[in-house]
Amino acid sequence: MLVLLALPLSGHAETEAELWAALKSGGHVALVRHALAPGTSDPAGFRIDDCTTQRNLSAEGREQARAIGARFRANGVTRVAIYSSQWCRCLDTARLLDLGPVAPFAGLNSFFADRSRHVPQSAEVRALIRAAAGGPSLVLVTHQVNINALTGVFPGSGEIVVLRPVGDDLQVLGRIP
């Protein structure tokens, strides 16, 4: 039987404790896929400014987001800058983390329905990360498609992918389920 291990692009996986320590030290990035929101895409005709037209967090997803925030705090990761996709499920996840003010950032918006947005939006996120270099760690709440485009990782709902910026590149240190 062949078993393949999914390792980050860096070729090694840090322990969960090391990932939390990296985030606590500043200068790192926590890419967070929004918490549980039933379904796979938004309904036809959804509007970004109207949550009733979008796929939203379930009660379980809201509890998951609170639990993720509690894990950040339990690991001493409290001094962060938080940015979120403008989609309601991401904004709700980011706010429920209860780690501080949340800044909506269009570069984190889903491009699931328009894959041509992949390159410019990924460039916007990379620019945001570069601009934050040397400061507190970033918490970026976004969508599976965005995280996959930036890292090659296909995260589960509420999963955290921890990155270290290295020049213009992003090194994946590991994943926190």
Image (tube, rainbow, N blue to C red):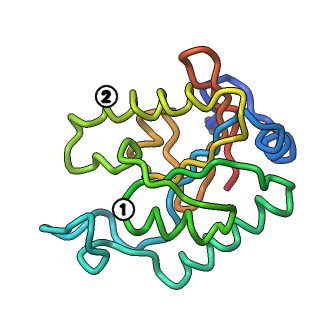
Given the current orientation, which residue lies at the most extreme top position?
A: 167
Secondary structure beneath disc 2? Answer: helix
- Answer above or below: position of 98 versus 24: below
Residue type at the position of mark 1: Trp
Give the quarter of the image for residue 87: bottom left
Residue at (56%, 31%) from the top-left corner?
A: 129
Work out whether residue 3 or residue 140 is closer to the camera in this orientation and state it.
Answer: 140
Q: Position of residue 50 (x, y in %)?
A: 26, 74
Q: Which mark is residue 119?
A: 2
Q: What residue do we see at 67% from left, 40% from top?
A: 162
- x, y percent for residue 115: 23, 39
Residue 170 relative to residue 18: left or right: left
In primary-sequence order, the first of circles 1 and 2 is: 1
**How far across and down, in percent of the image, does residue 140 sit?**
55, 48
Expressed as whole percent of the image width and height from the top left, the position of residue 71 reads 78, 63
**Can you identify the residue that label 1 sits on?**
87
Q: Residue at x 41, y 43 (%)?
A: 146
